[in-house]
Amino acid sequence: MNAPVLVINCGSSSIKYALIDPDPQAPRLAGLAERLGSAEARLKGQNSAGESFTQPLPAADHTQALNAIFEHLEGRLPGAVGHRIVHGGEHFTQAALIDNSVINAIETTAALAPLHNPANLAGITATRKIFPELPQVAVFDTAFHQTMPPRAYRYALPEALYTEHSIRRYGFHGTSHAFVSQRAAELSDRGAGGWLTAHLGNGCSTSAVWNNQSLDTSMGLTPLEGVVMGTRSGDVDPGLHTHLHRQLGWSLEKIDSVLNKESGLLGLSGLTNDLREIEDAAKQGHANAQLAIDVFCYRIAKSLAALSCALPQLDGLIFTGGIGENSSTVRRNVLALLPHFGFALNDNANEATIRGKEGRLDNADHQGPQVWVIPTDEEGRIAMETRHCLEARL
Ligand code: ADP
């Protein structure tokens, strides 16, 4: 297929899009329709000349926003649409061409992602309405982690919770972990060996990848499990919920909201979820900002050390995501907590590898596990999986 793929990530009140040509040199058109359903709804994006635009779309719904997005594609008609779907449960181990049975399966899985899957489905419904003839492919955040063995995906809970209610660890950020580990296999002389990946953005997760397959990851049934994130707590004592309910009278909704929206870097620093601001505040002596960085880095290192148990051998560690790609401080701190792994950070390379640069952070002749920064490309990966899914059906 020579036509571009339109990648869509549909939230409850937003649609993120990117038009991706098979030629990697071709400019990407990308943007975000946000605040849908409100008077302030608008479409922000970039045209192929790299110029930004904002178009008000008062009270627009998903269908109206998609129509507006299509008008900004500068006549480059997509040959297919690739949808990012958060949860594919155990049903989807790879991307799937969307038909009624796939839609039913995504609906069934919505019990596991009640906030995300219905919003993702709204994007599919709207696109089908506007372009019924365009093939659409669902690419799942969970699919890459479906290769995890039972010892990694089962919780130590009564079996019926798994067999009857699908309660197990699924993992997320699959397109990112898949993209960066595959890219490392291309770039490094180690190939598709044993890689630890750290996707550190607003959401953060770590993963252990062997031979291009995920063997374990830090997120679980939901994206709340694992390392500390922008506003999410990551792992807490499961007894915390009962404690907060009994001692403070908090409802489940309040506990859920605090752990997802008021915790993490924001909760610890008391300032913000933006690591750049936290790093600046820490430099100026803000004790809680420094504590937030310390906890954040320690928990990442601890998670990576734990995940190394999944790998038959350790060939390297990959940092990605807004923090992983930019914060030399976080990378240095995390590696300093793993001295027994034999990493060897080159400080100059660490300081220089920022703002979307791809590169190795240790010296080329280092024999131990390597350290790489690989900017993630989730949209590019979704477009690639969309193409592969369609080509496999020809
Ligand atoms: P999302 O998960 O929403 O895609 P990103 O991957 O863009 O998020 O990551 C956002 C995070 O990256 C924020 O915490 C932001 O502060 C951090 N970040 C971006 N640039 C830098 C930088 N230069 N230094 C430190 N942190 C950065």
Image: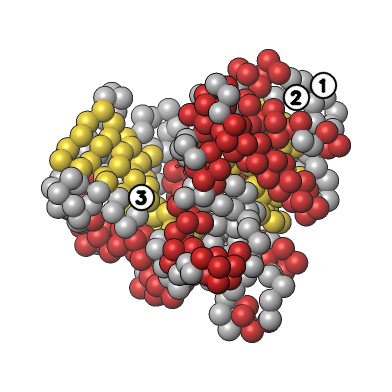
How many other residues sit within 10 Å of disc 1, few (<14), some (14-19) or many (≥20)? few
Residue 78 position within the rendered picture, expressed as x and y whole percent measured from the top left: 30, 46
Q: Nearer the viewer, residue 268 or 301?
A: 268
> In the rendering, which numbered label is found on residue 217?
none
Q: Which residue type carries mark 1?
A: Asp
The local secondary structure at tag 1 comes to: loop
Residue 194 position within the rendered picture, expressed as x and y whole percent measured from the top left: 76, 45
* Quarter of the figure with residue 251: bottom left
Q: CA distance from mark 1 to mark 3?
A: 42 Å
- Return the residue at label 3: 8
The local secondary structure at tag 2 comes to: loop
Residue 257 position within the rendered picture, expressed as x and y whole percent measured from the top left: 44, 59
Check the image and report above or below for 126 versus 54: below
The local secondary structure at tag 3 comes to: strand
Check the image and report above or below for 27 versus 135: above
Q: Quadrant of the C terminus?
A: bottom left
Q: Nearer the viewer, residue 352 or 225?
A: 225
Confirm if mark 2 falls within 8 A of ligand 1: no
Looking at the image, which residue sits at the far front?
247
Q: Earlier in the sequence, mark 2 or mark 3?
A: 3
Q: Which residue type carries mark 2?
A: Leu
- Return the residue at label 2: 345
How many other residues sit within 10 Å of disc 2, few (<14), some (14-19) or many (≥20)? many
- Return the residue at label 1: 365
Task: Please name which of the two marks, 2 or 3, marks the residue nearer to the observer.
Answer: 2
Q: Nearer the viewer, residue 52 or 229?
A: 229
Q: Which residue type carries mark 3?
A: Ile
Can residue 77 be seen from the camera position used here? yes
